[in-house]
Image (cartoon, rainbow, N blue to C red):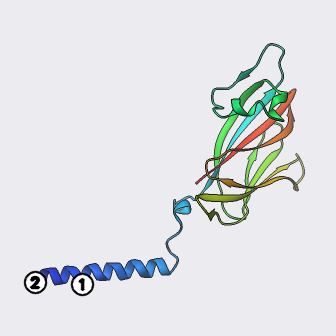
Amino acid sequence: MIRPFSRALQVFAGLVVVAVAIVCASGAVRPAFAAGPHGPAIEITVIHATLSDAGGSIDPLLRDLPQLTREQPFVRYNVYKVLGRHELPLETGKPATSDLPNGRALAVTLVDEPKDARGPRYHVRAEIGEPGKTAFLKLLEVTASANEPFFVGGQSFQGGTLFLELVVRP
């Protein structure tokens, strides 16, 4: 025998399940990797790499860099200093731009919606513009995992080279 109060509770629970099913079917629920109010962001770390006869050093903010300094093009330098680090929001098809210390501008674009095969993967394009020009030079297009750094390098700056560590933050 069902008591009137528990019957009402069962009906209410059934309505909640139906409402959730309608919301999910309408597409109002987004995948977990894009569920935040701001979506993914690109973290940009600007690194100045130089070669010094006085010995090498790596900025303590560059936790992952020591293992990379044994590979090209990092092996050409022995001093690495962080000049800046910041995040910009990523929106599909809209470039997120950042000024570089050498007067150029970096544009990072989320090319299409993130894919979620064993964790979110982001199709990203990085471009650098020259001062006074509106066109950007396409440097790199990658599919990157969340929180895994990739690098753009080769911009001359004060006797060394700028490396840009880019990390997609979900």
Residue at the image position 10 percent from the left and 83 percent from the top? 3
Q: Marks 2/1: CA distance? A: 13 Å
* Residue 3: numbered disc: 2
Residue kind at label 2, given as amino acid type: Arg
- On the image, the x and y values in percent for residue 147 come to 61, 48
Could you tell me which quadrant the N terminus lies in? bottom left
Q: Of residues 64 and 103, which is closer to you in this image?
A: 64
Query: Which residue is label 1 attached to?
Result: 11
In this rendering, the answer to whether 103 lies above or below 89 is above
Q: Earlier in the sequence, mark 2 or mark 1?
A: 2
* Secondary structure found at label 1: helix
- Mark 2 packing: few (<14 Cα in 10 Å), some, or many (20+)? few
Residue at the image position 12 percent from the left and 85 percent from the top? 2
- Mark 1 packing: few (<14 Cα in 10 Å), some, or many (20+)? few
* Residue 24: numbered disc: none
Residue kind at label 1, given as amino acid type: Val
In this rendering, the answer to whether 15 lies above or below 84 is below
Whether label 2 touches label 1, CB < 8 Å: no
- On the image, the x and y values in percent for residue 168 come to 64, 51
